[in-house]
Amino acid sequence: MTGVPAPSHQPFVPDRARLAGFALRAVLGFLPAVLISRAALAAEGMWLLDNLPLSRLQAEYKFTPGRDWVDRVMRASARIAGGCSASFVSKDGLVMTNHHCAARCLSQLSTAEKNLAAAGFLAHGRQEEARCPEIELNRLEQITDVTGEVKGATAGLDGEAFKDAQNAIKAKLSSACVGAEKQTTRCDVVDLYHGGRYHLYKYHRFQDVRLAWAPEEAVAFFGGDPDNFNFPRYDLDIALLRAYEDGRPAQTKDFFPFSKTGAEAGETVFVTGHPGSTQRQLTMSELDTFRDVRLLGELLRLAEERGVLEQYSKLGPEAARIAEADLFGVENSYKALRGELKALLDPALMRRKRLEERDLRAFVASRPALKASAGAAWDAIDKAQRAYRDIETQYSVIERARAFASRYFAYARQLVRGAEERAKPNAERLPEFTDSRLPEIEQDLFSTAPIYPEYEKVKLGWSLTKMRELLGADDPFVRQVLGRKSPDQIGADLIAGTRLGDPAARKALWTGGKEAIAKSDDPFIKLALAVDPAARAIRKRYEREVESVVQKNTELIAQARFARQGTSAYPDATFTLRLSYGEVKGWDEGGRKIPPFTDFAGAFARDTGVDPFALPASWHAAKSKLNLAQRFDFTTDNDIIGGNSGSPMINRNGEIVGLIFDGNIHSLGGAFWFDDRTNRAVAVHSGAILEALNKVYGAADLAREITGQ
């Protein structure tokens, strides 16, 4: 599955994902870009909508999208703030995304008596649509270039001063963009080309998002982890949500109509979505650290966490239901990161990256002005990577709160820091607590989603045990947290005494500010207060010695690329709206041709009656009514990455022909490069969606709505 979790503070990612109409400007000659040294690949690129490769599209596909086409595509596209893509598919705010992007909503709306992930959900009328406690939907409205303002604010600065100035100007720009409309407007300053350009993205914010329909997980994730990132696939990985405003369905002028027939083999198709992050333009020292520290460390942790969650799931059906969403996320991440590690262990890929860096450094060395400004940038970044390796464990365990794997602690951290930060001027706050970000925090804090104390106890005990293992039993931070008790004892005591499971208690602490926090006797609040000085200290060191150094010097490298290679390529992914283009096609592997389509008949043929290859009863009951020749899933050579889950796939007419939900196993190396021979995107066919709505789920009203009938 290509969904990407919302990242927290971590290196290497240039812009973080917890990061009225707009007439697109013709800026093809203005936006700098980075050309890869080899010949342009037919389908490579996650393109900014205001810098599309129009000449390539015309030359390769005889298609030049006009401004109206691009403008409508932009406003019909959407993103789920937690890390997925989506799209509007009706005038009444109906939104299409993946089932796995709505899985947490399904879990949060479920009970011990009614498991919506297993049973599926259909609202019989809009009055039955169920509000998702924590989903925020964003629709892009406007893009403004703010490169001059951001670079002007940080000119001549280094280290902590650089980071503070950058935070301040971003807060100022985003706050001015939001103005008095913070409940309906979100603004993010986006780092493009690793600091080569900065853009201000203005979104319309929808926080009342309701579930309209989702099939059973058994068909949405048919094949489970064995089939994940593979093909052929037979997944109906879709959910329909609806955006509401003022208690009524949002009226959306721009939306994608559905194609009943879908796309044919060889047809040109477009994916408009929000790829999370790629690392195609990192330096070699950054790639080495990414491989040796982040990937290896994350894989080891995920493997252990999977074991903990699987063991908990075996306690019974209710335990399995509670842990299901987390376990899916862990297994999905493990498989994706393993694919990335495999790519970075490929000698051919690393040799290619070294050659690209060598050539660019030689170009810089040959230009006196560039040599003076950017010649030392690579060495500075390398020094920052060495510094990061020295502090990575403390930074991850303490500031990223890996020691405290509990929703209770996450709430406590937000409350404690929120009270401290909101008392400061907006420009002096931590970026996640600036005025423009507060609605997102408040939606999370006031969520009515249930919390399960016994489950939290298991996760917290494990993460505290990992803290002691990684930092050592004699570490001052470990002694501060554990004292003379075991991790399990501390976890049990904290959870037994907390009231943070109650949304009303959290709201009272939030509105009460610093005074309420100071008076609180909640054990998690006390813990968050106690560990915050150490967390802020390691964060400051990371920002001073690593993040600010990397950001400043990658800006210099970006300028060198611009000087050398021109203005006609795309930046690394940043969870911002992009368009990729390609065609419906399979691939060759091991002497076999992999065809691009599967069909309903293939799903029934693969059904074994045993999880994860067991179609739900609803499908067997409807089998005689179904067109078994109906295409189910299909592959294209569109360039996608994590975060593209839920992206609409459209044809030249702007009609939905598919719904992205995955890439094949070869696409996992797409974080670092694109191989048009084997990299494939995987989508649900539009005809399969309509066939299932009408004949399996009795959802003819929704089918008529998305086909405009």
Image (cartoon, rainbow, N blue to C red):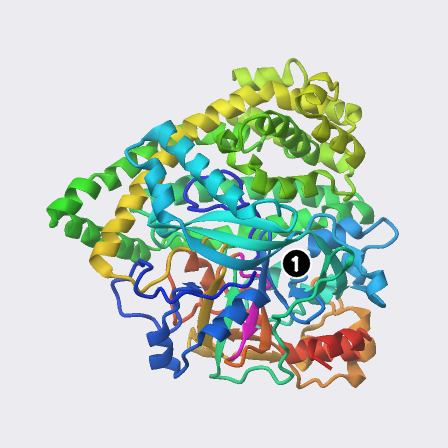
> Height in image: 93 above or below 600?
above
Magenta-drawn stretch contains 645: yes
Q: Is residue 637 visible?
A: no
Q: Residue at x 55, y 39 (%)?
A: 301
Prevailing secondary structure class for the magenta stretch in the rendered image: loop
Mark 1 Cα-neighbour bin, 10 Å: few <14, some 14–19, many ≥20: many
Identify the residue under disc 1: 100
Give the image location of residue 131, x and y in percent: 77, 54
* Image quadrant where residue 319 sits: top right
Disc count in the image?
A: 1
Q: Residue at x 78, y 81 (%)?
A: 623
Q: Which residues are magenta?
A: 643-651
Q: Nearer the viewer, residue 337 or 243?
A: 243
Q: Is residue 255 left or right of residue 219?
A: left
Give the image location of residue 8, x and y in percent: 53, 40
> Height in image: 107 above or below 270?
above
Question: Hey, which residue is sitting farthest top in the picture?
Answer: 484
Image quarter in which the N terminus is found: bottom right
> Height in image: 509 above or below 650?
above
Give the image location of residue 709, x and y in percent: 74, 82
Q: Residue at x 48, y 71 (%)?
A: 70
Hey, what amino acid is under mark 1? Answer: His
Q: Is residue 24 left or right of residue 256?
A: left
Per the image, label 1 sits on a secondary structure element best described as: loop
Q: Nearer the viewer, residue 479 or 356?
A: 356
Q: Nearer the viewer, residue 489 or 630?
A: 630
